[in-house]
């Protein structure tokens, strides 16, 4: 319809009735649409000023840059409106160590991790103080047996009550002697809840390695303690180590895993047969067997040296620790002890062997022994194994003892206050044979010590001796069986 008020009449024309209609104006378009129609959004207002220099786009970018710079200058502090202020971009100074710890303690992360700095925030009004701090229901502790320590004292130091400590010590004593618990043994303890703070916590459980082959556990049953034993299987196979001597016998043996104490014993054993520095070569092979106990739980314990061997190609040395005197015997059951005579009394040498002015006679005379000054009654010891050839009064020697030794040697001990042996007695080195005195021709308490070789007097300090012993019969058979058993051990096993 050309008009909402007109009528369409037949005859090819229209006629309007009433007020004539006003012409329709186009609707107003929004600003965004007008800008969009102008395609301003497609214009690059900030082009790269380093490219296409001199073009219309470049000049447009330069104008944009100048406009922004002018706006920044206009908004600077000198050109700001009254009341406006700038926001300074200042970087905080770095914190010191103490300030950093204090800040970190107040941070969220350290508090969430349990305040790892060790600092605590002050309590505020929301904190309700407890009447007393609650105790843990149980406490895990450990104790260690010290040198010369007692089992019950170690428990008391760890916090166990004296009654429980005594009861536990009595139970453990049934499994192992009170003095047999090794030093350094660790004891794991569990203490339970106590009825009040005035008494010690009760012992709930105890676990320890009582011996190398036995572990014990004590647990509380009612008002008392019960003990459970856990035997541990032990393998006693010795440990055999072989290797080349190389540049140093000691360092090579230690590098092979031999304990230091066993290496020292090994070198001392070889020193009874040869010179370590002169007779041992780098190409020689050492052979060492030591005691070793291996527990089923994995622990290992090493002991004494059992066998000392050295293979030099042309010569082989095999020594075994044997007998009550712990002597080193070779594979044939023979032992040899070398040494020099030591002083038979604890004192100081007042006169040596040789020519001297006699203190009583007043003229030069050969002194056939050595005088050792010592307090009256000091024990006198035999310098070597031997048999008492004589014991009694002997003119100027006073109370005198003469010992006959192997190899044509004899030794005499004069001026004794008292004699402790009789003629015919067998004595061993270090055995007391008398006591210092001043009998005979003497100016004071001392020992006159004299040594003879095939009847001729010699300087006692110049005597070097070697004593040889040989096993026989059942002792020799047992010894050879022991040697064969040690040589059957595989190296490294």
Image (cartoon, rainbow, N blue to C red):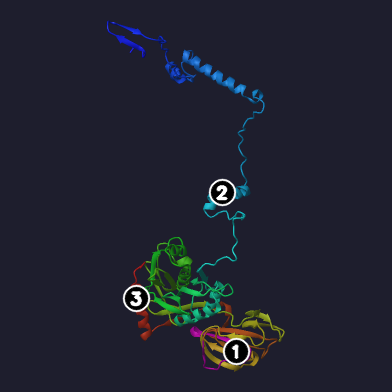
Name the residue rendered at 65%, 24% in the picture. 81
Question: Magenta segment, which residues?
Answer: 405-427
Which percent across, then down, holds residue 66?
56, 18
Q: Nearer the viewer, mark 2 or mark 3?
A: 2
- Give neighbour class at mark 2: few <14, some 14-19, many 20+ (Cα, 10 Å): few
Q: Circle 1 sits on which residue?
A: 434
Which percent across, then down, holds residue 21?
40, 10
Q: CA distance from mark 2 to mark 1?
A: 85 Å
- Quarter of the image with the N terminus in it: top left
Name which of mark 2 and mark 3 comes first in the sequence. Answer: 2
Tell me if residue 17 comes above or below residue 203 in the rendering: above
Asked if residue 421 lies in the magenta stretch, the reply is yes
Name the residue rendered at 60%, 33% in the picture. 89
Q: Nearer the viewer, mark 2 or mark 1?
A: 2
The label number, if any, that marks residue 107 in the structure image: 2
Say which element carries label 2. loop
Q: Nearer the viewer, mark 1 or mark 3?
A: 3
Q: CA distance from mark 2 to mark 3?
A: 71 Å
Say which element carries label 1. strand
Q: CA distance from mark 1 to mark 3?
A: 45 Å
Marks 1 & 3, CB-CB < 8 Å contact:
no
Asked if residue 49 lies in the magenta stretch, the reply is no
Pick the front one: 302 or 211: 211
Task: Please count the marks in the image.
Answer: 3
Tell me if residue 491 comes above or below residue 413 in the rendering: above
Q: Quadrant of residue 78?
A: top right
Looking at the image, the residue that sits furthest to the left is 11
Name which of mark 1 and mark 3 comes first in the sequence. Answer: 1
Which percent across, then down, holds residue 22?
42, 10
Q: Quadrant of residue 85?
A: top right
Which percent across, then down, holds residue 189?
49, 71
Q: Circle 3 sits on which residue?
A: 485
């Amino acid at each position: 319809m050309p008009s909402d008020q007109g009528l369409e009449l037949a005859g090819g024309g229209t006629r309007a009735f009433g007020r004539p209609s006003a012409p329709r104006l186009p609707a107003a378009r929004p600003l965004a649409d007008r800008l969009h129609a102008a395609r301003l959004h497609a214009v690059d207002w900030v082009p790269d000023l380093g490219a296409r220099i001199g073009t219309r786009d470049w000049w447009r970018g330069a104008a944009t840059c100048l406009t922004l710079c002018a706006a920044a200058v206009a908004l600077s502090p000198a050109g700001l409106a009254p009341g406006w202020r700038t926001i300074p971009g200042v970087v905080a100074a770095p914190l010191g160590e103490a300030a950093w710890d204090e800040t970190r303690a107040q941070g969220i992360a350290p508090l969430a991790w349990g305040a790892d700095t060790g600092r605590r925030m002050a309590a505020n009004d929301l904190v309700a103080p407890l009447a007393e701090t609650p105790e843990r229901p149980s406490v895990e502790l450990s104790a260690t047996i010290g040198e010369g320590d007692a089992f019950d004292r170690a428990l008391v130091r760890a916090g166990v009550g004296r009654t429980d400590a005594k009861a536990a010590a009595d139970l453990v004593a049934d499994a192992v002697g009170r003095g047999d618990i090794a030093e350094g043994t660790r004891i794991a303890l569990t203490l339970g809840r106590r009825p009040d703070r005035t008494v010690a916590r009760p012992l709930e459980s105890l676990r320890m390695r009582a011996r190398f082959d036995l572990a014990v556990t004590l647990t509380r049953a009612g008002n008392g303690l019960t003990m459970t034993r856990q035997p541990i299987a032990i393998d006693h196979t010795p440990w055999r180590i072989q290797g080349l001597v190389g540049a140093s016998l000691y360092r090579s043996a230690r590098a092979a895993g031999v304990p230091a104490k066993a290496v020292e014993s090994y070198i001392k054993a070889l020193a009874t047969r040869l010179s370590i520095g002169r007779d041992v070569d780098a190409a020689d092979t050492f052979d060492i067997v030591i005691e070793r106990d291996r527990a089923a739980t994995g622990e290992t314990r090493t002991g004494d040296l059992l066998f000392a061997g050295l293979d030099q190609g042309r010569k082989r040395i095999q020594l075994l620790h044997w007998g009550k005197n712990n002597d080193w015997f070779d594979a044939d059951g023979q032992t040899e002890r070398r040494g020099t005579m030591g002083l038979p009394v604890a004192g100081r040498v007042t006169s040596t062997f040789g020519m001297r002015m006699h203190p009583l006679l007043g003229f030069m005379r050969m002194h056939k022994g050595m005088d050792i000054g010592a307090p009256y009654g000091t024990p006198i010891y035999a310098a070597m194994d031997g048999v008492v050839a004589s014991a009694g009064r002997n003119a100027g020697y006073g109370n005198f003892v003469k010992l006959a030794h192997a190899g044509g040697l004899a030794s005499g001990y004069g001026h004794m206050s008292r004699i402790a042996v009789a003629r015919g007695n067998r004595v061993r080195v270090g055995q007391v044979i008398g006591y210092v005195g001043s009998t005979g021709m003497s100016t004071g308490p001392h020992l006159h010590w004299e040594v003879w070789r095939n009847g001729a007097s010699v300087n006692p300090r110049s005597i070097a001796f070697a004593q040889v012993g040989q096993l026989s019969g059942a002792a020799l058979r047992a010894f050879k069986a022991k040697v064969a058993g040690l040589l059957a051990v595989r190296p490294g096993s």
